[in-house]
Image (cartoon, rainbow, N blue to C red):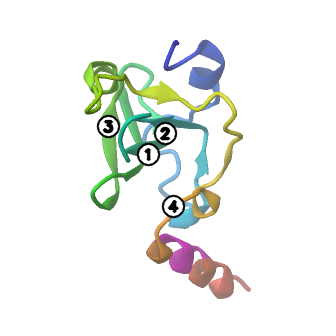
Amino acid sequence: MKLLTMAIRKRLPPLYANEELPIGHAVVQTKFFTPDSNWTFYATEFDGDDTFFGLVLGLEAELGYFSLSEMKAIRGPWGLPVERDMHFKPKPLREVDGCPQWIRDSAHADEQDEP
């Protein structure tokens, strides 16, 4: 399975494109996961080459950078590679499964601040 198709590449905004948005409002364009472990990667931005920005759920929930080359090299405990969720539909970060409460809270706080 191809982790990153041309269609997904075109949908992903460049790095830092969502900086002005409230944290939970950035749209996740694609989801990657380890089928034999508990790691999930939600990508909201991409540098066009190798580096994504988004939410990583594993031992902790963390916003940060992750790379396509690293995901291609990762193997879970049974030796299975990272896969792309082919049924995932783009949605705001605050709406993805496992999104930490601090992101959901910040998204709602930002909405309340609007006039």
Residue contact between numbered discs 4 and 3, judged by CB atoms under 8 Å: no
- Name the amino acid, label 4: Gly
Q: Work out whether mark 4 precedes mark 2 in sequence or the reverse, and give the earlier one.
A: 2
| Mark 4 vs mark 3, CA separation in Å | 18 Å
Q: Is mark 2 on a helix, strand or loop?
A: strand
Query: Would residue 97 appear left or right of 54 to someone viewing this image?
Result: right
| Mark 1 vs mark 3, CA separation in Å | 14 Å
- Image quadrant in which you'd find residue 93: bottom right
**According to the image, label 1 marks what residue?**
16
**According to the image, label 4 marks what residue?**
98
| Mark 1 vs mark 2, CA separation in Å | 7 Å
**Residue, x 40% and y 27% (percent of image)?**
82
Q: Work out whether mark 4 precedes mark 3 in sequence or the reverse, and give the earlier one.
A: 3
Q: What element carries label 4?
A: loop
Magenta extent: 103-107
**Foreground disc of the pair 4, 2:** 4
**Foreground disc of the pair 4, 1:** 4
Q: Work out whether mark 4 precedes mark 1 in sequence or the reverse, and give the earlier one.
A: 1
**According to the image, label 2 marks what residue?**
45
Query: Would residue 61 appear left or right of 87 to someone viewing this image?
Result: left
Q: How dense is the environment of label 1, judged by Cα within 10 Å: few (below 14), some, or many (20 and up)?
A: few
**Foreground disc of the pair 4, 3:** 4
| Mark 4 vs mark 2, CA separation in Å | 19 Å
State the image coordinates of residue 11 (x, y, percent, origin top left).
Answer: 64, 30
